[in-house]
Image: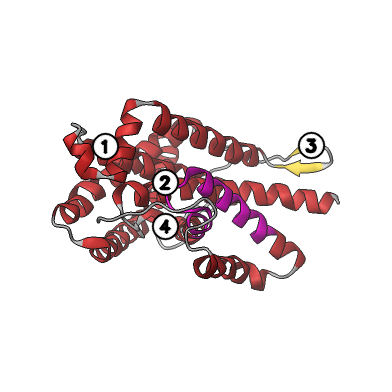
Amino acid sequence: MNLFLQQLVNGLSTGALYALFAIGFGIIFANMGILNVAHGTFATWGVVAAYELVIHTGLPFVVAVPAAAIAAGAIGLLAETFAFRPLREKNAGLLGSIIVAVGVWIILLNLAEVVLGPDAVALPDGVFPTKAIAVAGLQIPPIYFVNVLTLAVVAIGLGLFLSRTRFGAAIRAVGFKPESAAIAGVNARLALGVTAVIAAGIAGVAGILTAATTNNVSFNVGEGLLLKGFAAVVIGGFGNLRGAVLGGLAIGIIEIMTVQYLSTTFREAIVFGLLLVFLVARPQGIFGEVKVSRA
């Protein structure tokens, strides 16, 4: 039983990272109508910024994380301003946005490799406490608590922002029907720009926590998050905050349990087999679907 509970905790921590990434990925699609395959590189650049700040400026990890999230958000805003916004204004459609997103993905990924180098590196010793904490017979690394707590804070905070504030309502209005939002006086450019910053910033945090959990800093950190985040969004329902959280946690637990009780060989197969089942049987996901009619 202890082994099962230990792996459940491991799965929750891993799933929290997938869910965190999926939140940003989902709101981009829901509010911008973009299947942004470049979103993983925002996570990577969060890692790049945090690592460089810790190594070259000596900033404490807890200070470097929010600073790096801001940097990732800024990169997301640049992508929105110079890549995706012109497409929307020209009604290029979903396919056009995917093609441009692939281009942004390749550029940002190559730049990250130039900065970090082709080989993975570890975080400096002492940057983050690594000694596991004994809880009810389980060994839980401190980063696990951080992962789950961060997911809770982001999910609750973003949910309240979108549902309880006027600007959050403006963002939702632009995502639902941009023409009507414009007639009502909503600044669509501002709303979508803020959405891009929030989504990329959250991705940056997910990337940083992933690097801290695995102690693996590399230019392709975001690639694994992209695949699992996409699966989480599909399973939970595009654009649904609860769905992203549930989908991410479910994938993390299933992945860890598969490794423990079946084989590492089936780690990816089980997850993406589940994704295929949802795409065929319930493409709208668990919590329904956000219909998008624009690029």
User: Which region shows up in magenta?
Assistant: 231-256
Mark 1 or mark 2: name the one nearer the start of the chain: 2
Q: Quadrant location of residue 165?
A: top left
For the C terminus, give its image quadrant. bottom left
Residue identifier under label 3: 135
- SS label for mark 1: helix
Mark 3 or mark 2: name the one nearer the start of the chain: 2
Question: Which amino acid, by three-letter code, is at mark 4?
Answer: Phe
Mark 4 or mark 2: name the one nearer the start of the chain: 2
Q: Which mark is residue 24?
A: 2
Question: Which amino acid, by three-letter code, is at mark 1?
Answer: Ala
Residue identifier under label 4: 219
Q: Which mark is residue 95?
A: none
Q: Residue furthest top?
A: 165
Separation of residues labelled 3 and 4 (CA atoms): 34 Å
Where is residue 189 drawn, in percent x and y?
A: 20, 40
Question: Which amino acid, by three-letter code, is at mark 3?
Answer: Val
Residue identifier under label 1: 191
Where is residue 119 drawn, in percent x and y?
A: 46, 61
Count of numbered circles on the image? 4
Where is residue 29 drawn, in percent x and y?
A: 36, 52
